[in-house]
Each structure stands twice: as structure tokens, then as C-alpha cells.
Amino acid sequence: MASMLKQLRNSFTLTPHKVSVCILIQMYAAPAIFHIPEHFSSISHHNSFAVFLVALIKSYDDILEPKLDELIGQLREIGGLLDQRLTSKLSSLVSPDDLFNSFGELQGILGGSDSSVLEDDQITLDPSSNLGLFLRRCLLAFNVLSFEGLCRLLSDIDSYCKEVLSASPNFDLTRLDGFHDESESLLEYENMDLDTLAYHEVREEAETSKRSGTGISFHLHVPKVLDELVEGVEVSMPLKDGAKSRAVSSSKFPDSDALDKVDADAGTFLRANGQMHGYLLQRAGEIEKQGSSFPLNALESVLKQLHKLAPELHRVHFLRYLNMLHHDDYSGALENLHRYFDLSAGMESFDLCSSSIDGECVGKFEIALLCCGMMHVHFGHPKLAIEALTEAVRASQEHSNDACLAYTLTVMCNLLSQFGVTSASRICGSSYSPMTSIGSSLTIHQQLYVLLRRALARSESLKLTPLLSANHLAIAKFDMMHVQRPMLSFGPKASVSLRTRPADVCRELRLSSHVVSESTSEDPTVTRDGDFATAWLKRSTKRMGPLMIDPENESGIERNTFGFCSQQSSIPKSVMQQLGSSYLLRATAWEMYGSYSLSKINALVYATCFADASSLDDLALACVKLVQNLAAYKGYREAYVAFRTVEEKFHVISKSRVSLLKLQLFHEHALHRGNLKLAQQVCDELGALASPVTGVDVDLKTEASLRQARTLLAANQFSQAMQVAHSLFCTCYKFNLQVENASILLLLAEIHKKSGNATLGLPYALASIFFCQTFNLDLLKASATLTLAELWLSFGASEAQSALSLLHGTFPMILGHGGLELRARAHIIEAKCHLSDASYSVGQAPEVVLTPLKEACKELELLEYHELAAEAYYLLAMVYDKLGYFPERESTAASFKNHIIALKTPQDSEDDILNMK
């Protein structure tokens, strides 16, 4: 029993703020003559005060408990003179007998099974309710207080009340009855020498606690004088000048290291365990959501102060690890990760460890390795990450920690998907028994497929719903990017279609949404209710009930009333995140499959419905897709307007999606206008962003090389462009990036076409079409078909019909889903096929060539594609000349001349120059 009381005292300590809340609860449940306590004007006013009390004991918007002036300000907004009653009651607590009497009255408002006889006007609290549980904990904490702790509590209440005078000079406590006499009485307890009162007895108890290994409660701040005096009651000595004490202590923390020099927290109290746990979880969620845009110094100063006030709260090191991780501070992140697992055994931030031996949890080592592997993944160290994760797999199997093993396999799959790993690599060593027997005969992506399936099975058996949904999404991404091949190189094989199956991708996406939509397993007391309570208090700017009507505007109730009383969404945040990831992957899949309209719809759904629950990086990806869609279908002017909005919304840093989008738009626009100098500068910047480490930033390196080859092609440097494209193809083949190979093969075909080697370009175009068919890249296949048609057309007029038949076969895809450039190319090639055909006469059917050429000119004007627009206007002028339409011919020739001049003398616009700076 004594140990239970000691544990309770260490986990919940009475403070002046908790005493104030107890007084407010007593006001709420006071006996009433007309069924409503006298301080409340209506039933709705009384009910709103109850909601306020529940929010007050659950909120965790700060690490420190609110001051008395803050609490008084909130009570004034509710109305009913509750603030004056509170200060009057606090000022009346001048002796230990007053505290005993006050808490004895609190015992009477608790209802129970033994309270069978109640008066009609008596209001009782359910002991199992939120307010009842809080009151019972306060009563129990008060009952175990020693006399020294009781005197200390009285002294703290005195300092707590004096803060009102320092914060609000106009607030006069002497107006309250009996304040003068009470203040004199408080001086007696303030002058008590608590440092020598029962010193030896308490010192011996503290030393016994130290030898037993029990920690000191972190609820209260303790100066060095009292740190070793009273176990479990950590408070500061009250300063003689209360105003000076609170002037130094502030809830707004500076961004500097001034906290290291000044004891800025004398007289302040930390919140309770549950509130502190919710506060740190909330900050961890904000760090993971906002990433590098989260202010580093602001949180770091708060965590430094929290570490000073509560050195035993090792979760602070985990928050510092996350903060430095997302700000790319490798040494700081690694140091804080080591500190966290050294001091806390790694169990405070994870619920993965369920196995124990002799009462001691054995899951700390594998979880530490998992965190270390995730850190190396973030910093781009794939080899170190593979080593740490492989060791985590071994430790998880050794300790039978299936949950940690499931998470480790998922992180390993994400690593292999994110970084380029050669086919000769091995995922795991001999320590991973499932891969030992077949690992040597499988390719790297076949091993990845085995890992994905095993991770899916483990998460399903362990009922880890968010992880199960994430694994379905990972399998959908794998099915979208890789062709499933037989894993055995001998024996009978089932017939395998060497193509990806979009139906499998859609099935996995539906399974992910279906699984996660059934999940409601998120801690409601810490995350959801705490979030609501904090938001409720922050929105409490108007009174409730009849007092909600503004005296200056009595026309009706403010619209904010319903927002003030509204509950949060019943869908947990983790469910919203997984559903949003499903829509984001749908947008990527439809973009690959060539339906930009469906990709745009899914990106819009994500940006509209899941923005609050998504990370900043995922939201930026959705916005990037929308801007790219505008550039492809509306032109660059519309895209630049939208991009400025996106740039203002997101914190643009190096290698972010927004900065990459900026470079992509500039490169495409510069190539279309013929500004090769600017295009080369953008290519150099893209190449500089990529890491020099092999296998890291493979996607970024691939895009930079692809754009470099296109720039060289636009400059008619065919041999250099061919060399860059061949090197890039070898790199993609090495890392098995088959989807990227389709674009590279198409680029090689275009290089041969423009250099006049149509015969050499045909195999590349056909190979690109084959890759597109394999991965269902319909829109890229349409572009490759256009290139193939141009290659056939270059063999002479005899192949015009063959080229036209190829073109007509891909027209539905181009006109239905193609962008401005693709449609313009198709129209120009169609006109060239008709003009090259000897059986076609312009005079008999002029609209056959006039209509597509006019459409091409309109679309190319939006893109400012000078070279292709000049070709379209040239063909249109020839048709007008054959038809004898001389005014139209002259106008078209003038447009042709303007594009040629613009192509030869490109000029950067002022906006482009400013943006590049």
C-alpha cells in the first residue's frame, strides 16, 4: 500500500492550478435552490461551464500549467462572476485547517453507491466521469501530503495569487472580503524555515528512494535547495517579489540559449503525466507533418527548458531526435537517439514490445536498430540502413518481437523502393532465415516482392491496421512498377504474361482503403480528446447560451457558436493519412497509365479532403501534380500563376518537390522558347541537387541526365546527346528501372530521327513501344507511336499511308488524354502525311490539312513552342499558297517569321529572372 501511495504521489502532485480547478468543480456541483447553482444564468451556461472544465483538465497546449491570470481571463469570457468567486476562495486558504476544510467539502460532492439519500437540490459528480476522476486524484494526492508539503502548497498558492497583481495591476485583490487579514496570515507561512523543518527525516526518505531506484516526479520545478528535501513534491521557493518571479517566468520561450544562463522557471509547474504525454505526441506529429519547415529553434528552446525542469523525462530526447532529423542534423539526431535509448530503454515512444522476460522488456534493442535504420534512410545512407535493419530483423526474431519485425520489413521495403539497388545486391545476410534458402537465386526485386508479402502477412496476423494498409499500398506500387516473373529458374512454369496488371494495382488500392476505413484504434484520451480540449479553449472567445448574444449586436447568435461547440471529426488521423496516401497513389497510377484527367481528380480530392491530416511533403506532391497538369493542358502562364500560390504556401528548400517543380517548368519552357543557355543552367542545378553517393537520389539523377540529353538534342549536338542517353540507359538497366528505360529509348529514337538516321531510330522506337505495352504506359506509347510514324514518313511518300494508319490508331488516346504538345505534334504529323501522299489533292479537300494545322498553331501558341509552331505556320502558309488565299498566307508567313526570330534571339522574361534568383 505504501508503494502504491508513493507511486501515486510521484505521478500526480497537487499544484495551485489543480486546487483552482477543484474549486471550480465545487462551484459547478454546488447545491442549488432552483436546480442551477447561483453563479449560472441558465442551464446552457451551466453545461458550457462543465465542458470548459473537462477541456481544462485535458488540454496540453503548453508544457506549463496556466497562470491564474490566464484562468481568470477564460472565466471572464464565460461570465457569471466565476473569476471573483475563484480568487475569493483562493485568498481564504491561509492555514492548513482551511485546506483540510476545503478538501473535506470536495469529498461531499462526489456521488457513489453509498450515497442513497440525497437532497433534491444537490448535484453530485459521477466518480467515474472525467471531472470525478480528476477530483478523486486530487483528494488522494492531498491525503498523502506531509505537513511540510501542505505548508509548501499554501506558500505556492500565495505566490500563485500574487501573480494576478503583477500581471494585471488594475486588479485589486483587497476588494475581496478578508483579504487583508489573509495576507498577513500568509506571511507567517512564507517566513517559515522549511529548509530545516523535519530535514533529517525527509532527507533519509529521499536517500532511501534514490537507493531503490525510484525517480522524482517531474510535475514541479525544484531548485537545488529543495531538490533533495521532499520526494515527489518538486516546487520552487517563493520569491519575495512575486512580480519579479513571473516577469522572469514566461510561457513564451525565446529562440536563443538564454535559458542556460537564467533560472527562468522559478515558481512554475509542469502539467500532469497524461497532458505532457499528449503535448509531446502532438509536437511529434507536427514535426513529421511539416518536416523541415517546422521551426527548429522554437521547439528546441522548449525542449531544453523541459529537460531542465524534468531531467528524468527521456522522451524529450526522442523529440529532439525527430526535430534534428527533419532538419538534416545528422550528428545531433544520432546523439539524441543514443541518449534516448540509453536513458529510457527505448520504450516510451513505442508500443511494439509485448514480450518480457522476468518482468523486463527485451524489445529495446531491435527498436533502437529500427530507428537507426530509419535515420540512415532519411540521410541517404542505404548501406548503413541495410546493415541496421538486417540486424533489427535478427534481433526481432531472437526476441520474438513480431510487431517490430513487421515494421522493420516495411521500412526495408521502402528503402529498396526509394534507393537504387543493383541486381547483384543481397537484401539480408544469413541472419534472415526466410531468405537464406532462396536468396541467392532471386533478383533484388524478387527478394523485395518476397519481403512485401511477408510484411503483409505479419501485419495482418498481428492486426496492425495502419501497417497493413501501408503494405497494400506498397504492393500496389510494386505491381505498378515491376513485372512479376517466375521465381524458379528450372522446372515447370506456369504461363506468365510479361506485363503489369492494372487490375492488381486497383485491387490493392481498394483493399488498402477498405482495411483502413474499418480501423478506429487510436488512443482517444491522449490524441483526439486532448486535441479537442486544447482547440476548444483556444476558440473560447464568446460566452455560451443566452449570454452568447452580443449586447452591441442583439440581432442573433454569432455564427462562431456552432464552431465553438462542435466536436472534432470522428475519423482518427492515422486513418485519414492512409486514405489520403491511397488517393495520392491513385493519382500517380493514372498519371502513368495516361489518364491525366483522372490523375487530376484524385490529386484534387487529396488536396481538398486530406490536407489537414497529410504531411507537408505529400501535400506538396499533390500540388505539384496539379501545376504540371496546368502546364501540359493550359500553358505555362497558367502554371506560373498557380506555382506562385504553391510557392507561397510551402517552405521551399533544396531538393523539395516545389523547388524541383520550379526547375522542371523553367527547363521545359526554356527548351520551347529555344533558350538553351537557361536550359543548360537548369540542368546544372538539377545535377547539383543530387547526392554524389551511388544509389542515392536515383530518380533525381535520372531526370537530370534525361533533361541534359534533351538540351543537347535541341542544340543539335547529336553525338553528345547520344552518349548521355546511352550512359543513362546503362544506369537504369543496372538498377532495373524499366519504366524510365521506356522514356530513354524514345529519346534515342528522337535523336536518330533528328540527325537523319531513320533506320537506326526504328529499333529504339519499337523497343520503347514494347516497354510501354509491358507497363501499360498508354500516353507514352502514343508519343512513341508518333515518333515511329515520323520515322516511317521520312522514308518517302510511299510510306505515308503506313504512317497515317499508325497515327489514326493512336488518335483516340491523344485527343482524349494528351496535352497541348502531344496533340499539336499529332496534328502536324497528320497534315504532313496527307501532304506527302501523292493521292491527296489540297484543292479537293483543303479542310483535311487546314483544320489540324490551325489547331496545332493555337496549342503551340499557348506553349510558346517556337520551333514546332514555326513548322506548323510554314505548312499552313504552303497550303494557303496552293489554295490561292494570299492574305491568309501573308499573315501566316508573318507569324512564321516572328517565331523564327524569337527562336534565334531568345530573351528571358523579367519574372523568370526574378524566380531564378
Image (cartoon, rainbow, N blue to C red):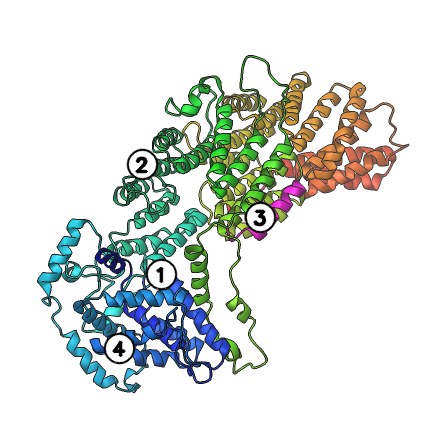
Which residue type carries mark 3? Answer: Tyr
Between 844 and 503, the one lying in front of the other is 503
Mark 3 is surrounded, within 10 Å at the Cα level, by few (under 14), some (14 to 19) or many (20 or more) other residues, namely: many
Query: Crowding at label 4, few (<14), some or many (≥20) Cα neighbours within 10 Å?
Result: few
- For image coordinates 14% across by 74% down, the residue present is 191
Q: Position of residue 535 (x, y in %)?
A: 45, 63
C-alpha distance separating marks 2 and 1: 32 Å
Residue placed under numbered mark 3 in the picture: 606
User: Rounded to the nearest whole Å, what is the CA distance between mark 3 and mark 1?
Assistant: 31 Å
Asked which secondary structure carries label 4, the reply is helix
When the figure is inspected, residue 703 is found, relative to residue 557, above or below; the finding is above
Residue 101's disc is 4
Q: Nearer the N terminus, badge 2 or badge 4?
A: 4
Of the numbered discs 2 and 1, the one sitting upstream in the chain is 1
Which disc is residue 365 wearing? 2
Q: Quadrant of residue 813?
A: top right
